[in-house]
């Protein structure tokens, strides 16, 4: 079975909306589009994190697909990212799109979870999700994502679309690797590692009566 890999940017407070430019996704009145621009530098290997889709098939949500479709086919022929993204097969999750202008684009028909589970079961290169926040949340809830390449940008945005919202499935993550760019971007890769494993530190689950007793002792009341 081939892997499904997610690559995305997020702020310190988990916002992933419109990292690339002001007009990328202003929905909900979001006015801080382009928030990662100041942190981009040559120390970031976008290919290693899958952002160029090299040797993979893309799985994209509607909005991310439309942003890419309007930009990458019109870049110079010698642009290496344009070359790989334009050549890649693209599976598009959408309820409204029926026609595609970008070559090698295919609509995921029917239930998106079932369609992507079927894609994973077929032979071929690994599947790569870029951006596509709503799609990521759906796939995370269905436990279909095998790896996360998360680039955390050192900004706090306060509001906007989040990588994981309140409906996210509680999941432990295991860190595979991590690196810091010259501008402070933390570039990390994680894999799901089973259910969350709660526990308690000594004294953390003491009864109210015991906590009151400890407080009195600490205050010298005894």
Image (spheres, rainbow, N blue to C red):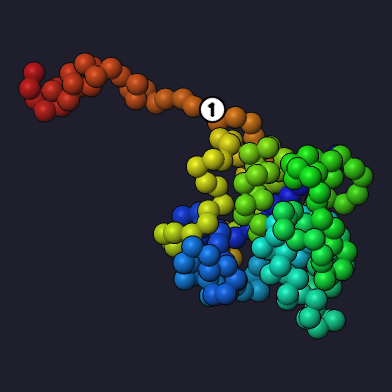
Q: Quadrant of residue 157?
A: bottom left
Q: Residue 47: where, in percent of width, then height?
A: 75, 64
Q: Is residue 66 left or right of residue 134?
A: right
Q: Is residue 195 left or right of residue 112?
A: left
| Residue placed under numbered mark 1 in the picture | 197
- Write the residue at 79% across / 45% down: 110
Answer few, some or many: residues within 10 Å of disc 1's Cα (few below 14, many 20 plus, some between 14 and 19). Answer: few
Q: Quadrant of residue 173?
A: top right
Examine the rendering and report whether any part of residue 5 can be seen. Answer: yes
Q: Residue 178: where, in percent of width, then height?
A: 62, 53
Q: Is residue 120 left or right of residue 218?
A: right
Which quarter of the rendered picture does the C terminus lie within?
A: top left
Q: Residue 2: where, in percent of width, then height?
A: 84, 44
From the viewer's perspective, is residue 59 above or below residue 175? below
Provide the secondary structure element on which disc 1 rests.
loop
Q: Residue 217: where, in percent of width, then height?
A: 14, 22
Q: Nearer the viewer, residue 13 or 135?
A: 135
């Amino acid at each position: 079975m081939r892997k499904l890999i997610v690559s995305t940017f997020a702020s310190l407070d988990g916002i992933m909306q419109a990292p690339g430019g002001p007009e990328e996704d202003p929905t909900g009145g979001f006015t801080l589009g382009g928030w990662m621009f100041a942190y981009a530098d040559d120390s970031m290997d976008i290919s290693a994190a899958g952002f160029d889709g090299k040797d993979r098939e893309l799985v994209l949500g509607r909005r991310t697909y439309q942003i890419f479709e309007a930009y990458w086919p019109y870049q110079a022929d010698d642009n290496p990212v344009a070359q790989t993204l334009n050549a890649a097969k693209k599976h598009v999750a959408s309820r409204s799109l029926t026609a595609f202008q970008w070559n090698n684009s295919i609509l995921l028909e029917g239930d998106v979870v079932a369609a992507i589970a079927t894609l994973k079961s077929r032979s071929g290169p690994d599947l790569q999700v870029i951006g596509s926040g709503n799609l990521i949340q759906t796939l995370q809830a269905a436990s279909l994502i095998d790896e996360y390449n998360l680039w955390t940008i050192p900004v706090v945005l306060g509001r906007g679309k989040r990588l994981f919202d309140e409906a996210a499935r509680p999941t432990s993550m295991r860190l595979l690797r991590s690196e810091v760019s010259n501008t402070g971007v933390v570039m990390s890769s994680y894999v799901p590692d089973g259910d969350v494993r709660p526990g308690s530190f000594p004294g953390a689950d003491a009864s109210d009566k015991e906590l009151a007793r400890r407080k009195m002792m600490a205050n010298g009341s005894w």
